[in-house]
Structures are given as structure tokens and as C-alpha cells.
């Protein structure tokens, strides 16, 4: 049993059995996305709003509640609910658009990922559905009334969950074989009184036939019809024949319609079919029997269950989706077997000595990470040009978003940052997803690393696409680091040292590195300016736009990211040189490039981007030959620490030509010793350290990093120093006056939409890179470098121990304290005391810099799933 899931993974990898074909790959929000937007001005929230989603066909994907689909999103399953009070069926998660929310877009639902295996042989998810009318209008009105200085108005604030008057809808999926999926829906009444629930499990075919296109991905219309009183027959031109069956004792009413737009309702035009996408809403809620197809066929169907559930009781609905679906007596036993196999797999892959509570958190983080896999379809050329059978898009679109990316063609499974708030890939998010995934699903992590380097994604000029709102933006170049760490972590998990993967990733990163050097080093002085680089609003102004008053911005983080790129590529090249000596030459190229960047950062113009008075790295504005430092102590000045690598004596002895070239270079550049920490060999082993700050500067930076009045939070490292609460940074220029103040919670500025904030909160991705960097420094300095942590405590430790203290603070976000409170849940009594809430954990986008409560997107089990790796490290450190 312990190897059952691993065998499935191996069978899938060898293409013997397609265990990964089906999974929770359905988007949780397709409406309001860029790829569904055909407006002239690019107003995606207005062009396809939530109110259209139940009646209008999607062009590029599908969404649904508690959904499951195949990897090409051809055959979709989800759940619809009605409590007898809502104005519409609950078919998909509701939330506010960017303009509606007082802090940007925000989902207004309670749902949780509970468990998953890499092949989704077992998957479990929970949705909490109010028994009272869902407060759609109130959420919109109250959020519109609130200002940016007010907190967000959440679904819990409306009172609909008071007295526990809600249903827990627990959806479980278990695979008997790759195409044979057992579905168990357990609906529990948590309220004090009996309550009615209409449950509609539904299947449909993604509409690929209405666009006037043919070829791969544009299949003709399929058909869903009754096969037996207990089962549907589903025929798809590409996927083949499937059935959806219910238990013999059940007697749902079967409903049929077509996955076609209700053009008459939305646009006052004749519909393509008399039976349209929103038919089930009209049949169930309005009693419109003519809305559904009496012939019992279509491209969308549902089984309508009318449940009456006593207080504290549950109702269970059993379904089976497969080539020949029959509910057998062994149905529940399959779930128990798959769940036990999931337990065994997770214990083998998360083998740290975790407490029960830590294991619960890690399991949910891994489940959310694996559930973030979503079918993502978007062919930019077709999107720009429009479809032959549809109206021609406005001409303005050809001068708008993503016009330079006509080569991008996506039809893949991608790990989303958040399947509701960010249901699209982002390049630097993906890198962190892969590192988190490498511990639990290393094969998928490798596939994701390589995907963005394919010609279908990477621009011909070598740029990686940032995210669909603006593929042209520059995300931090962390792809090489992710490839290197996935290579290492997969080997640790028993998948071997896959040098073929590493070599493929290395060559794609080599192309991308060249793009960065050619496009972002505008003055060819090795000081880079990459724009906002993912750190929304961390600067005093929008770093992606021309500077107010003119001038050039030289970025400490952009320059340091490139130095980090160099050290990572150097490490990869040295590893590849073990089997191919030609990589030693490439390794030396990155060694030289790193030194050039480090020298510029430390010396150019006198002191580069280093501020000797403050002992910190800052961005600076160059105007009329003068350099003005932007004296903001933030993550921007910590990123230079990431670029650190130790060259081992073993590499020198194995590659004498590399050693000779290195020694010759250093002999000719002895002045580097004063400002770059690359010169000093370790006296014991003759290792050499590559790092931007020499030891004296490193120690000064660490003073700020480990100071709780500055950057060190009780829950990790802040993105902006707390000192800027009382001493905000003010920048005056001809165009006005801008200010940066420590804001530990949600953003108080509309820069980048206002739904994320880098002016004080704790962010997992940069914290993760920081603790890894500190451990690399420790690998070189060992106990010769000790620091006070936290500053003022009198407790001295080495850098590994300092890193472990930061990790312990990060882990503390998700673990209950002595009162049962998890900091990530803020002061919520419900999550602290309610037995149906207290074991559930949310993994937010970022966390309050002072009290640790979760902020931003609530299901960021993309990069925040790194918490699982961190908690494991805490457990290992405790056991050491």
C-alpha cells in the first residue's frame, strides 16, 4: 500500500496508464479574466461579469464549484446548490471585481482544500454554503461604501454563518482506474434546525464548436443523453464515451440543456439553441419546465436531488464517472483504500518528525498546491484576431494588451497562484510553486519548469511571459533558481539526479538571461532597472513607469536579481560540467558576469547602490549626473543577500582549467577584495565565497534584518522596515510629493490595483529565499560569524540558527497557540472555537507585519504552500 501512489506516478510517467488525465483542473473563476475579454479598452471585469457567467458560454475555459475535469477541459463535472432562498443557483464562487472591492478583487466564499495525491487518485475539498439567502447585493454595496482605509467586508461579517446555519458540502473523488472516478458528496447540516438543500451534480462539454474554427482543440459538438434510469451516456469526439451514474437507490430528476449562450436574455438576439446554459437556474428556481430539453439530451446535464437534512445530520450522494459507470457495493471501500494510500504517500514524502498539528497544516498546504493545477487555454493570435463565427473584435485591441505575444499558445495544466483571485499563471509565482511541488510531486514540478521555456510561451526574443494582464512586464528572474532547487529536491525524494532536465532548463534560462542583459541594462553599466519586479507598490512611485520629473532609476533589487541569476547559473553549469567539461567555460562566464554586477553594485560612481552612512542597499535615481538614494529600508535592500554561492575545492580540483582562470582573474583584480566577498578563501577547505556584500557590510545589513523594530516581525521578515511608521520616506520632485510609510496590513494606495501590499507585510517567497541565502552564508562562515538574534536580546547565534529562527516565526503563522488561535486567522473566534472550523487552515497571499493575520488572496497555496517546506525544516531543526 505504501508504494501504491508512487506506482501510479511511475506508470503515468512511463505513459503506460494516464493517471493524471482527470483532476480538479476546472478553474474557479473564468469570468472577468483577460482571455475572456473582447472589449475595446481591455475592461475585463465589465466585459464578462459574474452576472453573465450562468448564461454565457466561455471561449477559453470553464469554471465550476467543487469541479473535476480532464487535462484539456473537454468533459467537466461540478456541483450546483440551491438553498431555496438564493436568486440563482450556486454554480461557482462569487467575489468582488477589482473596481468593486475597497482593496481590489476578493473572493467572498468559504472553501478549503483538504487532501490530494499527485495523480488525484484521492482528492477532497470542502465548501460551506449558507442556508439563508446568499448576500450578493449586500457584499457589493457595503464594499462600495467602504474606503481604502476600512477593512474588507467579508462573507462572515454579513451574519449568514451565525448559529452555524450552513451546509458543509464535502466533495471526495477516488479513482478506481485512470478514467474511472468515484464521487462522494457528503452534505452536512451544521445548523440547529432541519433544512432543505437542492443538490445538482452536473456534467457538460466545453463549447469548442461555436467559434468557426477546426483542428486540434476545436472539436465538433458531442452529446449527453440518458443511457439507463440511473446513468447518462456522454460522447465526446476526442475523449470518447463516458457514463455518469448515480446509486441504484437514488432517484434524482435528470435535467438536460445545451452549453450555449442565452443570447436572447443577454443581447436580445436569437439563441443558437432553444435550450441554453442557464436552463437549470430557470427550471429549479422559477419552475420553468420548458427551459430544459424534454428529449433528454444536450451538451449539459444534471442530476437534481432534493434533500431534507435534519439538524446535525448528513446526506450522502454517490456518483461514478467512467467508461462504464455502475455504483457497486465496494464503492465506499475504494475511498478508504485511496485515502489510506494517500496517508502512506504523504508520510513517505513529508518524512520530517512532524507533530499531528504540523502534519495537518502541511497536508492542507500540499492539497491546495496540487489543487492549484488548472487547465489554461489562451492562444493570443486567435484572441487578438477574433473567431470566424463571432463578431470581429474592436480594432483598438490590436494596439492594446499582449499584442507583441502572438506566438503564445497555451493549452496546458498550469499551477495557478490562486484559482479564484489569480486564475492565470505568473512567471515568478510559478517558480515558487515548483519548489514547493518538488517535495510532493517532483515530476509535475519539472514539467512546469520546462513549460514556460517552450517556444509556445517564451517570446522569440527570450523574454518569459509575466502574466496575462501584461506579458511584457518583468517578473523577478527566479526561474533558474527554481530549476536548480527542483533538481536537488527531486533527487532527495528518490527520483535521481536528472541532468537531462537540468540541461534543458539551463539552456532556456541562458536565452532568457541574454534577454535581461540586452533589455534591462540600459546604460550597459551592470546596474539594472526591471520595473516593479513583482514587488507591487514597494517603491515610492510606480517603478514600471517613467520617473516623475525625469531621470533614470537604478534598482538594487533588479541588479541583485541578476547577480542571483548569475550565481545560480554558475552552480548549474558546474553541476553539468561533471559529465560535460564544456560547461566549465560557461560557468566561468557567469563567474565573471557576477563579479561585474557585484562591482557595479558596490563601487560604480563611488559606492554603487550601497549607502555607507546607513549600511544598506538602496534604489537610486540618477538625474543630470547626480545620484539620489531612495533611503527606504525594505526587501529591495535585502535581495542583494540572495546572490551567494560557495565554490568548492572539489570543483577546482576536478576542473583545473576553471581554477587557473579564476586564480588569474583574481590576481589581476586584487582591488575586488575591498568591496566584494569573493576573494577570501575558507582557511580550512579553501572554498571561496561569491557574495555581493563583504563581511562588514553583511553584518550591518543583518543588524536591520534581525531587529524587531525594523525588518524582523514575530512572523517572518517584513517587506518594509517598521521604522518607516514614525519616519516615512518622502520624495519631492517637480511633479509633486510621494511618500512611503510602513503599512503592515492591506494597501492604502491604489498602485497596482491595491489588492496587494509590499509596504510592511510578510511575504513567503522572499522570506524563503532569504532563509536559504543565510544558510548558504553559514556554509562558508560557519561559527566564525555570529549575530545577535533578535537584536537587543543578548542571544548570539550563527547564521544557520538565525535562519531557523525566521523559519520558526513563519511556521507560527499557521499553528495554534495556547488559546487555540492561529495568527493567520486573525482574531476569529469561529476558527479558534468552532469544531467545524478550527482544523481548517487558509494560506493567504501575504501576512500582517505585526499580528500575522492573513491578507490578500485567501487561497494562495501557490507560493504560500512553501509553508509546508518551512514547517518540515522546523521539525528537523527541533529534532537535531
Image (cartoon, grey):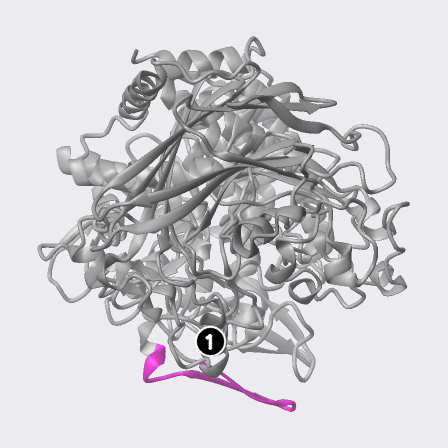
- Which quarter shows the C terminus? top left
Above or below, 334 relative to 732: above
User: Residue 487 versus residue 861: which sits nearer the camera?
Assistant: 861
Q: Secondary structure at mark 1?
A: helix
Residue at 34% from the left image edge and 12% from the top image edge: 3
Q: Is residue 649 magenta?
A: no
Residue at the disc numbered 1: 143
Count all numbered tags in the image, as a single digit: 1
Whole-percent x and y of residue 163? 22, 61
Residue 375 appears in view: yes
Residue 877 appears in view: no
Whole-percent x and y of residue 351? 25, 26
Q: Is residue 643 left or right of residue 165?
A: right
Above or below, 826 relative to 170: below
Whole-percent x and y of residue 544? 64, 67
Residue at 83% from the left image edge and 42% from the top image edge: 211
Above or below, 663 relative to 798: above
Q: Is residue 11 left or right of residue 551?
A: left
Q: Is residue 518 left or right of residue 447?
A: right
Of all residues, the one furthest to the top in this rendering is 16
Q: Which residues are magenta?
A: 724-740
Q: Residues within 10 Å of mark 1 (few under 14, many from 20)?
A: many
User: Residue 730 versus residue 788: which sits nearer the camera?
Assistant: 730
Res. 84 image quadrant: bottom left
Residue at 56% from the left image edge and 68% from the top image edge: 98
Residue at 43% from the left image edge and 60% from the top image edge: 85
Whole-percent x and y of residue 126? 36, 43
User: Residue 770 versus residue 460: which sits nearer the camera?
Assistant: 460
Res. 149 image quadrant: bottom left
Amino acid at each position: 500500500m505504501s508504494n501504491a501512489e508512487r506506482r501510479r506516478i511511475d506508470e503515468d510517467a512511463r505513459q503506460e496508464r494516464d493517471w493524471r488525465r482527470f483532476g480538479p483542473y476546472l478553474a474557479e473563476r473564468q469570468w472577468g479574466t483577460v482571455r475572456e475579454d473582447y472589449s475595446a479598452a481591455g475592461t475585463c471585469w465589465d466585459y464578462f461579469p459574474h452576472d453573465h457567467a450562468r448564461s454565457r458560454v466561455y471561449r477559453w475555459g470553464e469554471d465550476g464549484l467543487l469541479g473535476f475535469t480532464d487535462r484539456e477541459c473537454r468533459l467537466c463535472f461540478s456541483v450546483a446548490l440551491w438553498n431555496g432562498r438564493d436568486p440563482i443557483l450556486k454554480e461557482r464562487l462569487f467575489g468582488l471585481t477589482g473596481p468593486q472591492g475597497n482593496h481590489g478583487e476578493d473572493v467572498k466564499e468559504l472553501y478549503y482544500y483538504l487532501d490530494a495525491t499527485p495523480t488525484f487518485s484521492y482528492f477532497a475539498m470542502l465548501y460551506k454554503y449558507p442556508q439563508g439567502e446568499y448576500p450578493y447585493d449586500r457584499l457589493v454595496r457595503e464594499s462600495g461604501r467602504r474606503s481604502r482605509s476600512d477593512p474588507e467586508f467579508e462573507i462572515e461579517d454579513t451574519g449568514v454563518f451565525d448559529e452555524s446555519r450552513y451546509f458543509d458540502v464535502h466533495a471526495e473523488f477516488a479513482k478506481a482506474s485512470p478514467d474511472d472516478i468515484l464521487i462522494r458528496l457528503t452534505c452536512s447540516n451544521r445548523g440547529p434546525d432541519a433544512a432543505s438543500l437542492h443538490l445538482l451534480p452536473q456534467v457538460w462539454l466545453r463549447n469548442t464548436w461555436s467559434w468557426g474554427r477546426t483542428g486540434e482543440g476545436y472539436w465538433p459538438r458531442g452529446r449527453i443523453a440518458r443511457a439507463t434510469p440511473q446513468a447518462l451516456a456522454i460522447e465526446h469526439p476526442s475523449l470518447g464515451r463516458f457514463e455518469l451514474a448515480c446509486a441504484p437507490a437514488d432517484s434524482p430528476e435528470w435535467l438536460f440543456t445545451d452549453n450555449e449562450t442565452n443570447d436572447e436574455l443577454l443581447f436580445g438576439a436569437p439563441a443558437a439553441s432553444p435550450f441554453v446554459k442557464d436552463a437549470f437556474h430557470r427550471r429549479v428556481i422559477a419552475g420553468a419546465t420548458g427551459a430544459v430539453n424534454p428529449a433528454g439530451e444536450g451538451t449539459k446535464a444534471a442530476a437534481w436531488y432534493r434533500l431534507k437534512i435534519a439538524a446535525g445530520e448528513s446526506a450522502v450522494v454517490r456518483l461514478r464517472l467512467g467508461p462504464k459507470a455502475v455504483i457497486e457495493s465496494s464503492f465506499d471501500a475504494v475511498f478508504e483504500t485511496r485515502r489510506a494510500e494517500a496517508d502512506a504517500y504523504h508520510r513517505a514524502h513529508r518524512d520530517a518528525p512532524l507533530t499531528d498539528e504540523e502534519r495537518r497544516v502541511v497536508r492542507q498546504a500540499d492539497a491546495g498546491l496540487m489543487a492549484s493545477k488548472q487547465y489554461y487555454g489562451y492562444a493570443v493570435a486567435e484572441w487578438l484576431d477574433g473567431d470566424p463565427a463571432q463578431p470581429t473584435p474592436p480594432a483598438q485591441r490590436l494596439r492594446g494588451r499582449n499584442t507583441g505575444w502572438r506566438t503564445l499558445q497555451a493549452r496546458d495544466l498550469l499551477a495557478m497562484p490562486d484559482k479564484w483571485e489569480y486564475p492565470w499563471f505568473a512567471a515568478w509565482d510559478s517558480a515558487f510553486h515548483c519548489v514547493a511541488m518538488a517535495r510532493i510531486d517532483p515530476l509535475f514540478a519539472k514539467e512546469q519548469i520546462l513549460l514556460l521555456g517552450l517556444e509556445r510561451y517564451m517570446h522569440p526574443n527570450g523574454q518569459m511571459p509575466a502574466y496575462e494582464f501584461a506579458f511584457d512586464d518583468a517578473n523577478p528572474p527566479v526561474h533558474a533558481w527554481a530549476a536548480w532547487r527542483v533538481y536537488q529536491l527531486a533527487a532527495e525524494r528518490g527520483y535521481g539526479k536528472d541532468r537531462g532536465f537540468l540541461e534543458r532548463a539551463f539552456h532556456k534560462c541562458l536565452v532568457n538571461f541574454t534577454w535581461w542583459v540586452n533589455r534591462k541594462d540600459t546604460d550597459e553599466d551592470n546596474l539594472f532597472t526591471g520595473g516593479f519586479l513583482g514587488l507591487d507598490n514597494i517603491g515610492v512611485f510606480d517603478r514600471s513607469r517613467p520617473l516623475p520629473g525625469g531621470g533614470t532609476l537604478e534598482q538594487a533589487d533588479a541588479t541583485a536579481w541578476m547577480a542571483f541569476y548569475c550565481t545560480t547559473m554558475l552552480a548549474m553549469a558546474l553541476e553539468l560540467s561533471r559529465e560535460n567539461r564544456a560547461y566549465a567555460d560557461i560557468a566561468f562566464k557567469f563567474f565573471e558576469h557576477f563579479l561585474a554586477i557585484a562591482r557595479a553594485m558596490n563601487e560604480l560612481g563611488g559606492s554603487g547602490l550601497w549607502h555607507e552612512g546607513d549600511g544598506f542597499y538602496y534604489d537610486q535615481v540618477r538625474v543630470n549626473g547626480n545620484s539620489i538614494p531612495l533611503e527606504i529600508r525594505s526587501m529591495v535592500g535585502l535581495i542583494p543577500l540572495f546572490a551567494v554561492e560557495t565554490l568548492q575545492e572539489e570543483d577546482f580540483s576536478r576542473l583545473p582549467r576553471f581554477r587557473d582562470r579564476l586564480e588569474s582573474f583574481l590576481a589581476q583584480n586584487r582591488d575586488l577584495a575591498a568591496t566584494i566577498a569573493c576573494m577570501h578563501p575558507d582557511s580550512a577547505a579553501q572554498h571561496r565565497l561569491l557574495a555581493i556584500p563583504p563581511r562588514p557590510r553583511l553584518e550591518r545589513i543583518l543588524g536591520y534584518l534581525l531587529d524587531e523594530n525594523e525588518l524582523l516581525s514575530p512572523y517572518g521578515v517584513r517587506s518594509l522596515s517598521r521604522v518607516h511608521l514614525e519616519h516615512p520616506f518622502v520624495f519631492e520632485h517637480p511633479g509633486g510629493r510621494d511618500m512611503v510609510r510602513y503599512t503592515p496590513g492591506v494597501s492604502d494606495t491604489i498602485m497596482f490595483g491595491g489588492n496587494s501590499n509590499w509596504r510592511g507585510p510578510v511575504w513567503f517567497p522572499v522570506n524563503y529565499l532569504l532563509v536559504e541565502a543565510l544558510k548558504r552564508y553559514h556554509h562558508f562562515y560557519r561559527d566564525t560569524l555570529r549575530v545577535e538574534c533578535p537584536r537587543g536580546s543578548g542571544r548570539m547565534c550563527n547564521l544557520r540558527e538565525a535562519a531557523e529562527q525566521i523559519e520558526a516565526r513563519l511556521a507560527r503563522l499557521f499553528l495554534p497557540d495556547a488559546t487555540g488561535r492561529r495568527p493567520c486567522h486573525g482574531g476569529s473566534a469561529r476558527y479558534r472555537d468552532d469544531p467545524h472550523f478550527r482544523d481548517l487552515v487558509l494560506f493567504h497571499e501575504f501576512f500582517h507585519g505585526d499580528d500575522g493575520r492573513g491578507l490578500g488572496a485567501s487561497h494562495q497555496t501557490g507560493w504560500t504552500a512553501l509553508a509546508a517546506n518551512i514547517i518540515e525544516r522546523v521539525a528537523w531543526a527541533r529534532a537535531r
